[in-house]
Image: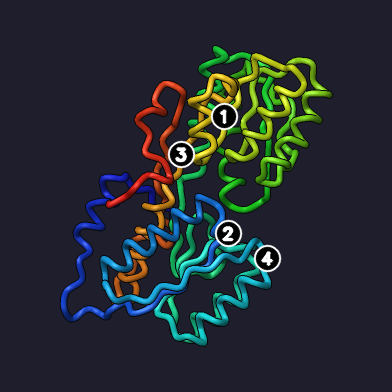
Amino acid sequence: MLKTISLAGAALALVMSSAPSSAKELKSIGVSLGSLGNPFFVALSKGAEFEAKKTNPNVKITAVGFEYDLGKQVTQIDNFIAAGVDMILLNPGDPKAIGPAIKKAQAAGILVVAVDTAAEGADATVTTNNVQAGEISCQYIVDKLGGKGDVIIQNGPQVSAVIDRVNGCKSVFAKAPGIKVLSSDQDGKGSREGGLTVAQGYLTRYPKIDAIFAINDPQAIGTDLAARQQGRTGIIITSVDGAPDIEAALKDPATKQIQASASQDPFFMARRAVQIGVGLLNGQKPASTVELLPSKLITRDNVAEYKGWTSERKE
């Protein structure tokens, strides 16, 4: 059973989680993330550090990027085991293939908490409610089109987060009989370049496209670039992430076809992951092994009030 919480409820949990003096102290934590050059993972790293130091100001934190190389992530986990960390927080390079490395860490008495994407065998997972993110991003399209139009779902790498976003989007489109989905199986690779490439194919093949839902912001930006290169206008582009690049695009008249993104909060996500891990360290099992954080739709109308990933955070 999945547990969906409100931000207010999660914040309350953070406030109430102050450990008693007899609690087991978090002394060290290893963090393995996709790339520390990616703003999303930078924010995750900062959130983990913030919460860990709130728990213990002297905690040792080692954050590394595996650069989307599964073998490198496995080596990082081995290094964390050798260092005797109390907890590993990771974004899995491959949700299933990382399973044996997770089991090895657990056999050494180390807790493993996954963030952003579920990992097989992890003690807990904290992620955005990606079904909801797909729903609200695609509901925006339905509303803008008045329930009628030709649309594309630009898919991506088949990890749980992407699958959930696409399923959420499809469920919304299925409720609108006037919406025709032209394509939903093309993989934009989660990147700007991938989004550009697959969008070029769509734009060549289909003379009429009213909207495109991209599974993340980089793909959306690549899609917009492809449309502008081909002189195609009047296409609504939405996505998921609320990343700095999409935040800038939503403020830029030149990229007006990008209209919305369902946001994630990686800083808060990592805080929750550490807090849950500390609870597990002290024998406190969460109500569910998967905790879902709600997503908020960022549009051109409300982007000015949006506190994005690079904002200075103290909570």
Question: Where's residue 234, x and y in %?
Answer: 64, 14
Furthest-right residue in view?
205
Q: Residue at x 55, y 64 (%)?
A: 119
- Per the rendering, the mark at residue 28 is none
Q: Residue at x 54, y 56 (%)?
A: 117
Question: Where's residue 277, x and y in %?
Answer: 36, 69
Q: In terms of image quadrants, where is residue 6? A: top left
Q: Secondary structure at mark 2?
A: loop
Q: Nearer the viewer, residue 102 or 216?
A: 216
Q: Which residue is mark 1?
A: 238
Q: CA distance from mark 2 to mark 1?
A: 24 Å
Q: Are marks 1 and 4 in contact (CB under 8 Å)?
A: no
- Per the rendering, the mark at residue 35 is 2
Q: Which residue is mark 4?
A: 69
Q: Are marks 2 and 3 in contact (CB under 8 Å)?
A: no
Q: Amino acid at mark 2?
A: Ser
Residue 63 is left or right of residue 224, and the answer is left
Question: Where's residue 150, x and y in %?
Answer: 69, 19
Of badges 2 and 4, nearer the viewer stands 2
Q: Which residue is mark 3?
A: 263
- Location of the N terminus by quadrant is bottom left
